[in-house]
Image (cartoon, rainbow, N blue to C red):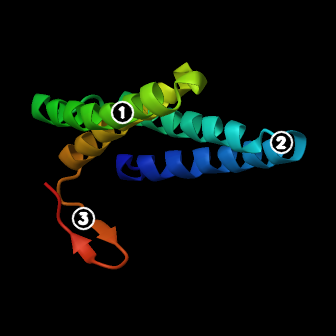
Amino acid sequence: MSKNNTPSLYYIGFLLIFLLVFSLVCIYFPLDATFLTGNLFHLYILGINLLLLFDYKLPNKKAIGNAMLLTYLVALTEIDRHLIWEFYRFNWWSLMPILLTFLASLNFFRLKEVYPESDLVFISHGKIRLG
């Protein structure tokens, strides 16, 4: 198996696990399904990000700086929302989108370094070249 297929296989494998656990959550915990599904989705994305980082390592320093900038922007919105509007409901799971943004942007920049010839295909706009 080529390393080019690895991200797709991780995605498919984790998607199957996610759908199985999601169906079990909806069956056994119908009242808490929204909260549990959100946390399950976070863990699903975290797992994919960690496996891809483990396989492909970290990107260059400029890409890490760009990832930190994106994370800072997400952190501003998340922290503002939780400190001002939802302070009474704050928990550590509320910081998960900040961590996921950092890891996902690191993975994106690294995969663009490893496969620079790959295009991102969007449905309505055709091929868009990044990088």
Q: Amino acid at mark 2?
A: Leu
Disc 3 or disc 2, which is closer to the eye?
2
Count residues near mark 2 (Cα–Cα under 10 Å), then give few for <14, some for 14-19, many for 20+: few
For disc 1, the neighbor class at 10 Å (few under 14, some 14 to 19, many from 20) is many
The local secondary structure at tag 3 comes to: loop
Residue 24 in the image: state x and y as whole percent: 82, 43
The answer for how far apart the CA atoms under marks 3 and 2 are is: 42 Å
Residue at point 70%, 50% (across, down) = 19
Q: In the figure, is residue 47 to the left or right of 59?
A: right
- The residue pinned by badge 3 equals 119
Spatial CA distance of label 1 from label 3 is 21 Å
In the rendered view, tell whether residue 58 sits above or below residue 12: above
Which residue position is annotated with label 2? 31
The residue lying at 33 percent from left, 71 percent from top is 122
Task: Kindly indicate whether the residue at mark 2 contacts the one at mark 1 (C-beta within 8 angstroms).
Answer: no
Q: Is residue 120 above or below residue 93?
A: below
Amino acid at the residue labelled 1: Leu
Are discs 1 and 3 less than 8 Å apart at CB?
no
**Identity, as a three-letter code, of the amino acid under mark 3:** Asp
Q: Mark 2 falls on what kind of element?
A: loop
Residue 54: quadrant of the picture: top left
Residue that numbered label 1 is attached to: 103
Near-viewer residue (36 or 50): 36
Instruction: Name the residue located 60 percent from the left edge and 26 percent from the top edge.
Output: 89
Whichever of callouts 3 and 2 sits on the residue coming sooner in the sequence is: 2
Near-viewer residue (24 or 84)? 84
